[in-house]
Amino acid sequence: MPAELNDLLEDLTRRMDGALESLRRDLSGLRSGRASPNLLEPVRVEAYGGDVPLSQVGSIAVPEARMLTVSVWDRGLVGAVERAIRDSGLGLNPAADGQTVRVPIPQLTEERRNELARAAGRYSESGKIAVRNVRRDGMDQIKTFEKKSEISQDDMKVWSDAVQKLTDQYVKKVDDMLADKEREIKQV
């Protein structure tokens, strides 16, 4: 394989890894009935004259499988943290206990499980689209190299096959991530 192909594949791999990482974050935000600090990642608290991420006003812990706790650093923000979690649209009902906010994770209904599985499917489809967009960019670069006579048509075929093989590997990774998340949603 020519060095240029390795450079191209390295760049495409890095970009496809970015698409997978984005999907991983999206899927981790889906509540599967099990406590995860990632669940509170999108929560923003009104504090210090603006909206700040929850992680900047307290530390999040998982003391048990169905409970999150937020240890708020500033006693004056306990009410704001509690309110922010309640108003976040995550369906959680926090309760203050001194400087700690306890967040019980409710059981999932079958309807909610199906809804989460559909959302996971939408996220994975977006991940596949992102991977395919990276592939398209790679194929366009290969065609440009061939048009400029920097590579032969035979090389173009070899390079295109390598990019397609890489794409297939990443699409399989997306499918595997979706299957794992669906299994997690169904188990709880």
Image: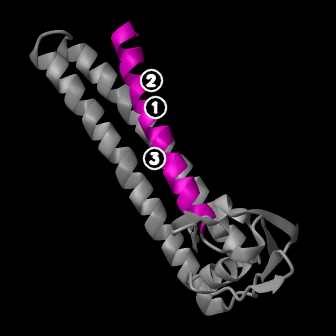
Q: Quadrant of the C terminus?
A: bottom right
Q: Is residue 13 above or below residue 42?
A: above
Question: Looking at the picture, which amino acid does disc 3 mark?
Answer: Ala
Give the secondary structure at mark 2: helix
Find out whether the residues at labels 2 and 1 contact each other: C-beta distance under 8 Å.
yes
Question: Which residue corresponds to the image point at 51% horizontal and 69% vertical from the top-left?
Answer: 49
Residue 172 appears in the picture as rendered: no
Question: Residue at label 1?
Answer: 13
Question: Residue at label 3?
Answer: 19
Q: Residues within 10 Å of mark 1 (few under 14, many from 20)?
A: some
Magenta extent = 1-29
Cα separation, mark 3 vs mark 1, equals: 10 Å
Q: Which of the two residues, 68 or 29, is positioned nearer the viewer here?
A: 68
Looking at the image, residue 24 sits to the left or right of residue 37; the answer is left
Cα separation, mark 3 vs mark 2, equals: 14 Å
Residue 44: % across, % down = 56, 70
Q: Is residue 22 above or below residue 121?
A: above
Return the disc, 3 or 2, that comes first in the chain's sequence: 2
Question: Looking at the picture, which amino acid does disc 1 mark?
Answer: Thr
Q: How many labels were placed on the picture? A: 3
Residue 60: % across, % down = 76, 64
- Colour setup of the view: one colour
Residue 118: % across, % down = 50, 77
Question: Residue at label 2?
Answer: 10
Question: Which residue corresponds to the image point at 42% horizontal and 36% vertical from the top-left?
Answer: 15
Q: Which of the two residues, 50 or 71, is positioned nearer the viewer here?
A: 50
Question: Which residue corresponds to the image point at 63% horizontal and 86% vertical from the top-left?
Answer: 86
